[in-house]
Image: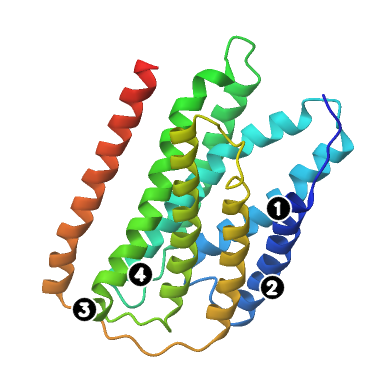
Amino acid sequence: MAAVFLSPLHYIPWLGSLIAEAVLIGIMLHRKLAPRFPFFFISILFDVARGVILPAIGFANPKTYAYFYAYWLLVPLEYSFSFAVIYEIFRHTFKADIKFAPRTIRRFAVLNLLLVVVAAALVFNPAAHIENLASPILVVDRSVEFLRCALLVLIWAFAAKLKITWRHHLWGITFGLGMYSATGLITAAVDVATNRMCSHWLTPLPHFAYLLATIIWPIYLYREEPEREPLTREEIDLYRNVLGTVAKAVTEIRKRVLHDDNRN
């Protein structure tokens, strides 16, 4: 395998994100926000650990497949954390304050351990081909990005009725994720339109968009947020219909992507 080489387009967003996330972790611990947003906090810890471990493996073993194996073993964890954060934001969106039971966190940890075992079985199985996993991974990736964008649009459209302002922590977290995911979706659309996967000037933009998100989050979580009134039962029932519409849209996108991949 070729030696590892990083251009400024790679190491600037990589190092910048690591520094910003380290600051974010410190702020969340100092302000005791980790128990309030446990899945978001865990996802940031995971991203920092991955951002350190994967490059270290790549530089230490540039002529082996160690980086390849490590990357694919971490893929299921990445998407599991992504869906968990979306779930957490949805719950906070429709209630002013939520505390997750320790049992929920333990079940989440066990589930992720099982996912790593399954990933290891697929990666290290000689009969398995990574190419066959590309389609389902692409479907999951697009679904996650679409959900993040949908969250941002939902909060923007119903902010007043949801009693959420731009000064709330929830707004800042969602804005960062939505902006990052929108950039990723635009880049993916250009890939499809030009039939040039990861070979155009837009390719680095998602990495810089994530860097911007990691800068936005510490700023938001460091600031005090205003009190938020709890939603009424009628308001929760009303917005549940909105969530159902979003879920149907994600299902339709997944079916269309699978259909297009099968035709190709």
Residue 197 higher or lower than 45, as above or below: above
Residue nearest the observer in this picture, 164 or 16: 16
Mark 1 vs mark 3, foreground winner is 3
Between the C-alphas of marks 2 and 3, the distance is 33 Å
Task: Tell me the SS state at disc 4.
Answer: helix
Q: Is residue 107 visible?
A: no
- The dot on residue 161 is 3
Tag 2 or tag 4, which sits nearer the N-term?
2
In this picture, residue 60 sits left or right of residue 251: right
Mark 4 vs mark 2, foreground winner is 2
State the image coordinates of residue 212 (x, y, percent, origin top left).
59, 66
Residue kind at label 4, given as amino acid type: His
> Callout 1: few (<14), some (14-19), or many (20+) C-alpha neighbours within 10 Å?
few
Between the C-alphas of marks 4 and 2, the distance is 23 Å
Between the C-alphas of marks 4 and 3, the distance is 14 Å
Between the C-alphas of marks 2 and 1, the distance is 14 Å
Residue nearest the observer in this picture, 21 or 183: 183
Task: Tell me the SS state at disc 1.
Answer: helix
Q: Which residue is mark 2?
A: 23
At 57% from the left and 52% from the top, the residue drawn is: 206
State the image coordinates of residue 239 (x, y, percent, origin top left).
18, 65
At 63% from the left and 34% from the top, the residue drawn is: 73
User: Coloured how?
Assistant: rainbow
> Callout 4: few (<14), some (14-19), or many (20+) C-alpha neighbours within 10 Å?
some
Quarter of the rendering occupied by the C terminus: top left
- The dot on residue 49 is 1
Residue kind at label 1, given as amino acid type: Ala
- Asked whether the beta carbons under mark 4 and mark 2 sit within 8 Å of each other, the answer is no
Q: Which residue is mark 4?
A: 92
Tag 3 or tag 2, which sits nearer the N-term?
2
